[in-house]
Image: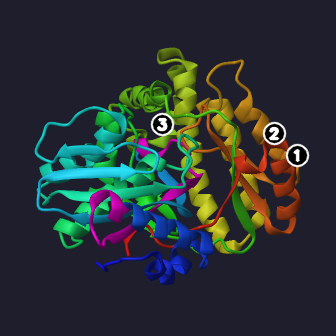
Amino acid sequence: MNVFTYGREACKYFADLYGKSEYGQFLRYDKLIRNFKKYFRLTSCHLISSPGRVEVIGNHTDHNGGKVIACAVNLDTIGAFISNDSRRIRIKSDKHSLIEFCVDDEITLKRGFGLAHGVTEYLKNAGYAVGGFDVYTNSVLPSGAGVSSSASFEMLVAEIINESFNDGRIPVEILARAGQYAENVCLNKPCGLLDQGAVLSGGLTEFDFKNGFVAERLNSVSGGFKFVLVDTGFSHSNLSELYASIPSDMRAVALNFGKDRLIDVDESAFRESYGSLCNIVGTDKTNRALHFFDENSRVTRFALTLENGDVREITHLINASGDSSINLLRNCAVDENDTAILDAVNFARTLGNVGARVHGGGFAGTVLCVIPDVSYNVVFGALCERYGAANVLPMRVRSVGTVVL
C-alpha cells in the first residue's frame, strides 16, 4: 500500500479510476487527505476507491441463482485510512458524525454503524484477521438512487481489512458475502451478491450465481451506446419489505418443485405447470417466476449481442427486460397511484431507439437508459430538460473495482 500526504500524489491513478485525469478529483482527494490528517491528527494515510455499479440487465435474478450483467461506474466512495494499534474502527465523513465500534463487540443494528460492523463480523467469523483502523470517507454516490452506495461503502471497509490485516488474500466471493451478510442482518434486506460483486470486479461483467459466484469480464462498451440513469426523485432506501417479497415469492414457486431456488427448477416443467401454479400459489407469484426464467435468457442473449455490436438488438433487449419488470415482476411502482418509474421509461422510449427499464431493486429510484451514440446528445438534452440536469446521471464503465491505491 502506498502512503499519501497530499492530493497531487493520487493524480496518476485518475485515468484508470475515472477515465481521465480531472482537476475536480484532485481537489476532492486533496481535501479528503487534509480532513483525515486534521481529524485524526496524523500526517499521512493510505487511499482507497470503491465504485458504484449499474445493473445493465438481469433484474432480480441473482438471489435465485440466476445471471446478471452489471458494471462498475466512475462514481465512487473514497477513503483516507490507516490502521491503528487498537481493536477499534473509527469512520468519519463530511456528512456524518463519527462511527466507532470495537471489532470484538456484538453487532449493533444501525444503518451506517451496522453495515461496517456487519462486514467486520462476517470476516472475523470466516477466520480472517480483523483489527482497528481510522478512515475518513467521501462519496459522490447518490443515496437511494440505485447505484449501490451501500455496497460501495461495505466493500471499502472489506478491502481495507483485506489489505491492512490479510495481505490482500481474502477471495472476492468472501468479501462480497461479507457485504451481503451486513445487508441481510443490519438492514433486513435479502439481497444477493450482485451489488458487491460488481463493485469489486470492475468493468462490464457477466455474473452467474447458480453455484456461488462466477464472474466473466465482457468486452468494453465504449463504442455504440452509453448508459444514463434518470433519478425519478423518490428514494428506494426504505423499501426493504417490498424487495423481500420478490425472492420470497420466487421461492414459493420453487418449493412446489421441491427446490429452494428457481435456478434449480427445470424450466420446461415450470412452463408446463404455469396454469396450475397460478391456482396453487397465485398469479402474481407465478409471474415473478416467469420473469426470472425469461430474464435469465435475456442476459445470455445480451452477452452475445455485445460481441456482435448490434446496438438495435441491445436496446430491444433492455426494453424487453423493462416490460417484464413492469408486467411480470411488478417492481416499478409502490402502488397504483405511483407512476414515476413508468413515466420515465415511457418518455425515454419516445426519444428514439432508446432502451429504458427500471434500475436495480425498483419500486422507486432510477431508470436506466441505454442510448445509441448517434442520438446521445439529443436524448441526453431532452432528459435533462424534463428531469433537470442534476437528476440525469451519465455513467462511464470503470475498469477497476474496489482498490487500495
Which span is picked out in magenta?
36-64
What amino acid does circle 2 point to?
Answer: Asn
Instruction: Judge whether residue 39 is colored magenta.
Output: yes
Report the Cα–Cα distance between label 2 and label 3: 34 Å
The x, y position of residue 84, in whole percent, is 17, 62
The residue that label 1 is drawn on is 350
- Placement of the C terminus among the 4 image quadrants: bottom left
Please report the residue visible at 55 percent of the width from the left and 69 percent of the height from the top.
27
Residue under label 3: 269
Nearer the observer: mark 2 or 3; the answer is 2
Question: Where is mark 2, residue-wise?
Answer: 346
* Colour basis: rainbow
Q: Relative to residue 247, is residue 358 drawn left or right?
A: right
What kind of element bears circle 2? helix
Residue 230 vs 71, above or below: the answer is above
Q: Is residue 394 left or right of residue 190?
A: right
Residue 267 forms part of the magenta stretch? no
Q: Residue furthest top?
A: 279
Q: CA distance from mark 1 to mark 2?
A: 7 Å
Of the residues under marks 2 and 3, which one precedes in the sequence? 3
In the displayed structure, 372 sits above or below 105; it is below
Residue at position x 35%, y 31% in the image: 188
* Residue nearer the viewer, 67 or 364: 364
